[in-house]
Structure formats: structure tokens, C-alpha cells
Amino acid sequence: MRIFGANDNFPLPGLRPVVTLGVFDGVHLGHLVIIEDLMATARKIGAPALVVTFNPHPRQALGRSAPSGICSLEGRLRRLSETGLDATWVLPFTRELSRVSGREFVEEYFHRRLAAGVVVLGQAAVFGRDREGNVGNLAEWVEGLGIQVRVISPFVVKGTVVSSTAVRLAVQSGELDKATSLLGRRPSIEGTVVRGQGNGRHLGFPTLNVDPHHELRPPPGVYLTRTVIDGAWFASVTNIGRPPTEAEIGAGLADFLIETHLLDYSGDLYARTVEVFFYRKLREVMRFSRSSGLVRQVSQDLNAARQWFADHPEN
């Protein structure tokens, strides 16, 4: 998949591309239904399949409270690439862009910049100043531009319309199985391994301290997880929350930590990027007055984790 920036030249070589537009945060099943139609349409007529995505989130660019990101831009582009798309255009969302009317957006971006032959949008898609553009008036605005419009109905899973908002609500409330059914994969945290205090290593349970690249995460607790490092999967146990001992809290350590212990791995992963996928909550966060109590509990957690992963090798 080719990735284009704001100043790259268009159109793509060959026939006029089939285009879709959106933030695509999470690249969930609702997004994938649109992308599948986009690609099928493109293959049928022999044209390139192109996604236009925004960065940062429009609400963030306008100084408003933006929703928690389901994945980073890098994660979004990686998952878009996995679909087999020909290209993605990362369009910087600025205050200037927010002032472009819906009709102007169609003429400037879909027609002049991209030379789109077909635009595929979800039924709830909006664009342009004050979100005035939608699939209803888009059909009117493309008249005379040689652009066809395809509208994709919402994708529903067990009575829930799949959307980024629904995914966020499921993850934030700890409904991991529901989030999985909406995403088409386990919810995850991607981040960089950073130096910690080394307390886990001193206690015999070294952990990866993960600095997340995006905001969305499950609620505090201890979770059964699988961690991906350079394409390899490792069973793991992940703690989300405050440090577990009173001594660590008293020492002024971070109020909120993401710490992952890999069950069968040894080595230094400092500064590496990892992705932690969440399967099941093992227990709530607990506080320990002494490290000995923590050691006993972690031992029990790891034994429970090994048994669960042995019973669910393909889960």
C-alpha cells in the first residue's frame, strides 16, 4: 500500500480511483465492510482503491475534547495496509480544512485533487464545514463531475451498530468480548517499552513498562493478554493501574502504569514497540503492604494464566 501525504501529487496512475473517506480509528468491522466494497468495486473496473483518512482527529484539531484513540496513526495505517488497499492518503485536518464547505470539499478533493471515479461512503458519513456534507447531498454535488456514489448500510453485530464509539464504550467498560466482536480482533494497546523502577525484576517477575501510543485502554485490573513483538506472539499477564505496593505509591511513582509480564521470554526490549492484546480480566487491582504479599499473588496469577492459555491455545 502506498501512503501519501498532504503535498503528494495526484491522481494515481491509471483509471480514476475508487475513494472512501473517514477517520477510520480502529479499522473495525464497520470500516472493513466499506473497504471490502471499495476494493470489490475497484477490482471490477480495474481502478485503484484509495482511502482518505484524517490526522489528527477533527475534534482535536478544533481544540475540542477528542475521543480516546483506539489505535495510533501507525497502527491505523498498518491495518489499512493489511486489507490489500492500493493507497491511503493521510490528510492533515486543520482549522482551514474545517472551513471548507461540503460542496467545495467534493470539488477540490474528490474531483480536482483525486480525480475520483467512484466515492464509497457509509450511510452515516459526514464531511465539510459543520459536517454539512452527507450521502444525501453528495449525490447532488457530484452531478456533472463524472463521479458515481455508493452508499454502504451500517454493519450490525448482535443488535449493535458497529462504530468507533461503540468500540470505545465496550473497551472502557471492560466488555472485552463485545469489543472483540466489533473490532474483529482482540482490543489492544500498542506502545513503546520504557525504563521502569526495576521492581518487578527484583521480585523475580520482570515486566515491560509500556508507554501507550494511543489513549483507549480497558479499566484498571490484571488481565490475561498476548503480546506481539516483531510478529511473534507471547502469552502474558498485564496490570493496568497504580503501583501495587504502598512503598511504590509512597515513592511517588506514576499514578497509572501498564506493566506486562511475558510468560516465556527473556531479554531486553527497551525502546521496542510492542502490542498487547486483551483476552480476559483475571482480577481487580490489589494493594499490598509488603512485597511478600505481592510475590504470592503474582505467583498465583501466573499459574492461573499458564493454565488458561494451555486450555485456550487458539483463543
Image: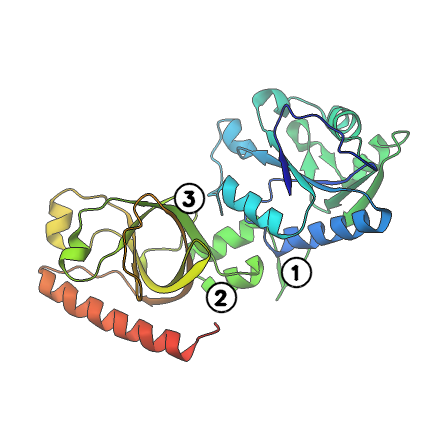
Residue under label 1: 156
- Asked whether the viewer can see residue 264, the reply is yes
Of the image marks 1 and 2, the number of the one nearer the N terminus:
1
Q: Dot 1 lies on which element?
A: strand
- CA separation, marks 1 and 2? 15 Å
> Can you say whether 303 is above or below 46 in the image?
below
Residue under label 3: 215
Q: Residue at x 80, y 28 (%)?
A: 111
Residue under label 2: 177
Q: Position of residue 218 (x, y in %)?
A: 40, 55
Q: Position of residue 177 (x, y in %)?
A: 49, 66
CB within 8 Å, label 2 to label 3:
no
Circle on res. 115: none
Q: Position of residue 269 (x, y in %)?
A: 31, 50
**Residue 111 placement, left or right of 279:** right
Observer-nearest residue: 56 or 133? 56
- CA separation, marks 1 and 3? 25 Å
**Residue 3 placement, left or right of 314:** right
The answer to which quarter of the image holds residue 76 is top right
**Residue at the extreme front:** 267
Name the image quarter holding the N terminus.
Answer: top right
Q: Residue at x 22, y 73 (%)?
A: 300
Q: Residue at x 42, y 62 (%)?
A: 233
Of the image marks 1 and 3, the number of the one nearer the N terminus:
1
Of the image marks 2 and 3, the number of the one nearer the N terminus:
2
Mark 2 neighbour density, 10 Å: few (under 14) some (14–19) many (20 or more): some
The amino acid type of the residue labelled 2 equals Asp
